[in-house]
Amino acid sequence: MPYEPVSLIWESILHACLIHGDLKLSERIAERLMELEPQSSLPYLVLTRLFEIRGQWEGVVRVKKAMKRGRVEKVIGCSWIGVKNQVYTFKADQLQHHRGKEIYLVLRLLNWEMEAKVALSLKKVKPPHGKNAFPEAPGLALM
């Protein structure tokens, strides 16, 4: 390459390594990413996951110790939702929210609306040459 890839490129490659289960390449990419973004938890989490999948618990412990040594904190997932012109945030590790009833009402309405749209997009079709394109759902296809 005529220039050094930015961390976003390395992150994309690391995600691909996770999908394909390539531990050796993941380790190399993770090291490079740790140099570019020392406080990013992504390389540590990907390596931990790959070691867990393989049952290599020594590797899991080694990566977690490296995270502690580097004072890298795991980023917790966070979501936002707007209710009555106010935005509320809640984290993945948060069980309840002070405006929980309103938030869950909005989420149920959104879920209902999405289910209705999916139901409308399902349409009975006859596949060409009498073959079923979706054997798990006879006569149905997503449009």
Image: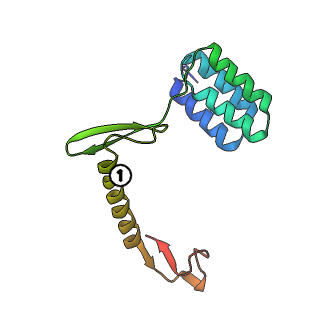
Q: Quadrant of the C terminus?
A: bottom left
In this rendering, the answer to whether 52 lies above or below 134 is above
Residue 61 seen from this side = yes
Mark 1 crowdedness (10 Å alpha carbons): few <14, some 14-19, many ≥20: few
Q: Nearer the viewer, residue 37 or 103?
A: 103
Where, by quadrant of the figure, is residue 121 drawn?
Answer: bottom left
Q: Is 137 on the left or on the right of 123, as rendered?
A: right
Where, by quadrant of the figure, is residue 2 drawn?
Answer: top right
Where, by quadrant of the figure, is residue 3 drawn?
Answer: top right
Mark 1 lies on residue:
104
Q: Position of residue 9 (x, y in %)?
A: 54, 30
Query: What secondary structure is found at the residue carrying circle 1?
Result: helix
Q: How is the protein colored in the picture?
A: rainbow
In this rendering, the answer to whether 14 lies above or below 135 is above
In this rendering, the answer to whether 10 lies above or below 67 is below
Tell me which residue sits at (65%, 43%) in the image: 19
Q: Nearer the viewer, residue 89 or 8?
A: 89
Q: Is 101 on the left or on the right of 133, as rendered?
A: left
Extreme-left residue of the structure: 85
Q: Amino acid at mark 1?
A: Tyr
Tell me which residue sits at (46%, 41%) in the image: 95
Residue 22 seen from this side = no
Q: Position of residue 102 (x, y in %)?
A: 29, 50
Q: Quadrant of the N terminus?
A: top right
In this rendering, the answer to whether 78 lies above or below 136 is above
Q: Position of residue 116 (x, y in %)?
A: 36, 68
Give the number of marks.
Answer: 1
Q: Is 76 on the left or on the right of 69, as rendered?
A: left
Q: Position of residue 21 (x, y in %)?
A: 71, 41
Tell me which residue sits at (69%, 43%) in the image: 20
